[in-house]
Image: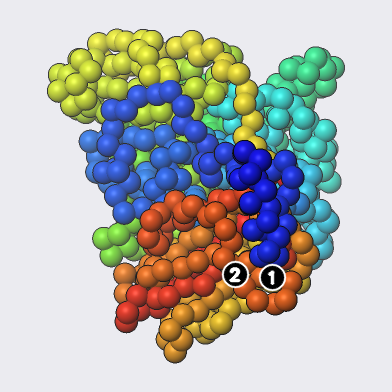
């Protein structure tokens, strides 16, 4: 800036007790990643409807336009669920993806639960902002998620670290994500930790069968047809299962893939052979040729390694990871069998012909012996898409089977006519069974957007500079669109317009890359499209100095008034959503004051330049304030406005980001002072102070 203006600015800051930091200007990077070159065929505002913080979705997600209104509505709803589950744990470890919106007593430090971590990575791999999953994978492999865990009955007595509390498929998910981002360096940098993670299942490897054993509850399945056939239905049923064994096969293959990329062919050969041996053992011991299905085999008091009679939904898991041979395709006949897994709100977690079907299921959570479980439905639909796209043709299932199953899955995700996902659904009635208020809302324990993108629309990421597009859409659809899907640093758009009148780009099936048409065919069908990798431009690392999820020590949030249950610390807890229950907000509901404030004491001088506020709006008594100001605490204990603070909205806006940026200053505390609209109060779901360290 000109010298005279710079001197005036320095004088003003000094008079106000503010310390400008030399060499620091107002941040140029926005709060969201840039979308870049692409197409603009779809009306994003119409598609997002009333979703909060629309800017986040516009910057991050691929947009779809589908003839099926329910499948489409749940697609955008599930991205909202995922956004709500993003939790900032602090500057040291950054972001994780939560399962529940509220805390539970059996989670790892900061609230991670590894059971659905693979689902979280598969779902979130399509986001443009890669920082969320970069942090999340490091959390499970290097951070608190990989730390020591008590080996207790409550937390899994068989393992001693949080990343092995439940079965998971972290290496496979890491590779699946790298195929989309194109950032193989990040994945290969995790190789030592991925190998260690794989090896740490070795105490549960049985040398006689060559298989791993697992307790159903630590597959995230508390009461099952398997465990009911043991003395302890809740924590019993130890056995060889097509879950952990499949995950270990898939993870070994993924580690081999990453090892080859680093030139470590010895390690690649070793893990390839381990995967082969485990696959053969699974086929030998868990595949039942009489009932043509993968089954649970009890570990104890079972010298002949007899399989249980019942077909459980976990028998489809091998196809979700390409570990089942093509000769086993007959298993898919059970998906549409009225005595198997066919159900209007299914599939159920055990076949209908089982005597354990819905046993005690309506007594309360958590019975996986018939209820429709989104976690398992996700795996089954992933498996079905793999069978239809990656395996040879067969006569048991087709793309109409996939669409029917996906549509049923979408139809389960409603409650009282509004989108809703909880823990388990009745297989035959439009009723969520395990749906505890304040606990189960927007339960992030499954995938859905990934099923639409990789299954229905057939975007099949590849390890090379190509993408395979193989839609499973119904032949009756006259149009659909997928716009600006992030892939290898570029934007991929796919259009189907039968007569050319829907999108006005001409008739046929078209593919665009960075806004330019690169492929076409008359009707939807398989296309392999070259996608040259774009230069890798990592997003800047940023930290939120105001975050304090534990609410202990500093930074410390205080307020002039707080409604009971809406503590000031909820605005700095690292979570940000706009639900009524459970809540993550501070409000002044019923405050007697004509104005109120929320303050953040950093506990030490801290540079600030990028403040992000999220005012809460419940469309009733709590609304965005009439006016507000951002203030800084002076050394004498008084407050004054931070100078030069342009705001992203001219007036306070509810359930959206209000961003305030200014030249970097060093201070010990900030506060928001606001005056409510007449007859209302106000609140904040988040008060954040971001900077690039």
Q: Is residue 562 above or below residue 686?
A: below
Q: Pointer 2: what residue?
A: 640
Instruction: Find the residue positioned furthest to the front.
Output: 4
In this rendered view, identify the residue nearer to me: 481 or 397: 481
Density class for disc 2 (Cα within 10 Å; few <14, some 14-19, many ≥20) is some
* Percent x, y of residue 477: 21, 28
The way the protein has been coloured in the rendering is rainbow
Q: Is residue 95 visible?
A: no
Mark 2 vs 1: CB contact within 8 A: yes
Residue 229's mark?
none
Locate the N terminus by quadrant: top right
Locate the C terminus by quadrant: top right
Q: Is residue 193 above or below residue 166?
A: above
What residue is shown at x 45% (from left), y 38% (from top)?
59
Direction from residue 138 to residue 432 in the image, left or right: left
Density class for disc 1 (Cα within 10 Å; few <14, some 14-19, many ≥20) is some
* Percent x, y of residue 36: 46, 27
What is the secondary structure assignment of the residue under circle 2?
strand
What residue is shown at x 70% (from left), y 29% (from top)?
187
What residue is shown at x 47% (from left), y 39% (from top)?
60
Residue 634's mark?
1
What is the secondary structure assignment of the residue under circle 1?
loop
* Percent x, y of residue 572: 61, 65
For residue 632, which quarter of the picture? bottom right
What residue is shown at x 52% (from left), y 37% (from top)?
33
Q: Is residue 597 visible?
A: yes
* Among the two numbered marks 2 and 1 on one chain, the one whose residue lies closer to the N terminus: 1
Q: Is residue 621 above or below residue 526?
A: below
* Percent x, y of residue 350: 47, 51
């Amino acid at each position: 800036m000109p010298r005279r203006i710079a001197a005036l600015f320095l004088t003003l800051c000094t008079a106000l007790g503010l310390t400008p930091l030399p060499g620091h200007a107002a941040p140029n990077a926005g709060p969201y990643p840039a979308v870049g070159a692409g197409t603009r065929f779809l009306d994003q505002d119409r598609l997002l409807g009333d979703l909060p913080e629309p800017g986040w979705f516009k910057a991050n997600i691929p947009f779809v336009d589908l003839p099926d209104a329910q499948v489409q509505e749940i697609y955008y709803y599930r991205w909202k669920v995922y956004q709500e589950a993003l939790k900032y744990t602090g500057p040291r470890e950054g972001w994780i993806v939560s399962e529940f919106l509220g805390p539970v007593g059996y989670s790892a430090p900061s609230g991670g639960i590894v059971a659905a971590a693979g689902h979280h990575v598969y779902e979130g791999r399509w986001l443009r902002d890669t920082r969320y999953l970069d942090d999340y994978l490091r959390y499970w492999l290097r951070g608190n998620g990989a730390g020591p865990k008590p080996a207790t009955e409550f937390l899994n007595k068989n393992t001693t670290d949080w990343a092995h509390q439940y079965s998971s498929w972290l290496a496979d998910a890491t590779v699946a994500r790298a195929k989309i981002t194109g950032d193989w360096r990040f994945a290969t940098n995790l190789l030592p930790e991925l190998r260690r993670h794989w090896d740490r299942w070795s105490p549960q490897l049985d040398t006689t069968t060559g298989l791993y054993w697992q307790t159903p509850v630590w597959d995230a399945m508390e009461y099952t047809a398997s465990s009911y056939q043991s003395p302890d239905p809740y924590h019993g049923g130890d056995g060889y299962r097509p879950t952990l064994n499949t995950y270990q096969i898939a993870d070994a293959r993924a580690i081999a893939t990453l090892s080859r990329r680093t030139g470590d062919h010895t390690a690649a050969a070793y893990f390839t052979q381990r995967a082969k041996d485990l696959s053969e053992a699974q086929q030998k011991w868990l595949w039942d040729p009489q009932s043509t299905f993968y089954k649970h085999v009890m570990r104890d008091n079972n010298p002949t390694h007899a399989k249980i009679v019942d077909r459980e939904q976990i028998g489809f898991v091998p196809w979700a990871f390409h570990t089942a041979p093509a000769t086993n395709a007959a298993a898919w006949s059970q998906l549409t069998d009225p005595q198997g897994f066919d159900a209007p709100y299914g599939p159920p977690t055990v076949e209908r012909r089982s005597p354990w079907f819905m046993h005690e299921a309506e007594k309360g959570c958590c019975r996986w012996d018939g209820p429709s479980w989104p976690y398992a439905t996700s795996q089954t639909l992933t498996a079905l898409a793999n069978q239809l796209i990656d395996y040879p043709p067969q006569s048991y299932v087709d793309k109409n089977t996939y669409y029917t199953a996906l549509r049923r899955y979408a139809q389960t995700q409603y409650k009282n006519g509004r989108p809703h996902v909880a823990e388990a659904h009745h297989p035959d009635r439009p009723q969520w069974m395990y749906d505890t208020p304040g606990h189960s809302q927007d339960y992030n324990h499954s995938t859905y957007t990934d099923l639409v993108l990789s299954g229905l629309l057939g975007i099949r990421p590849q390890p090379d500079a190509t993408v395979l597009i193989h839609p499973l859409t119904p032949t009756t659809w006259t149009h659909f669109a997928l716009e600006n899907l992030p892939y290898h640093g570029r934007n991929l758009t796919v259009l189907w317009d039968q007569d050319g009148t829907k999108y006005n780009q001409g008739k046929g099936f078209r593919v665009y890359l960075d806004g330019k048409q690169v492929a076409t065919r008359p009707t939807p069908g398989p296309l392999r499209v070259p996608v040259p990798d774009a230069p890798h431009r990592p997003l800047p690392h940023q930290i939120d100095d105001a975050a304090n999820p534990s609410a202990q020590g500093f930074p410390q949030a205080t307020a002039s008034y707080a409604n009971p249950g809406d503590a000031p610390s909820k605005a700095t807890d690292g979570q940000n959503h706009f639900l009524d229950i459970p809540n993550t907000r501070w409000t002044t509901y019923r405050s007697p004051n004509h104005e109120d404030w929320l303050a953040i004491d950093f506990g030490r001088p801290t540079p600030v330049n990028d403040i992000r506020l999220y005012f809460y709006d419940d469309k009733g008594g709590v609304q965005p304030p009439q006016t507000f100001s951002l203030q800084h605490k002076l050394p004498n204990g008084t407050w004054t406005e931070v100078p030069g603070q342009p705001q992203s909205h001219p007036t306070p806006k509810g359930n959206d980001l209000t961003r305030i940026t200014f030249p970097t200053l060093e201070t010990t505390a900030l506060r928001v002072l606001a005056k409510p609209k007449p007859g209302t109060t106000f609140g904040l779901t988040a008060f954040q102070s971001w900077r690039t360290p």
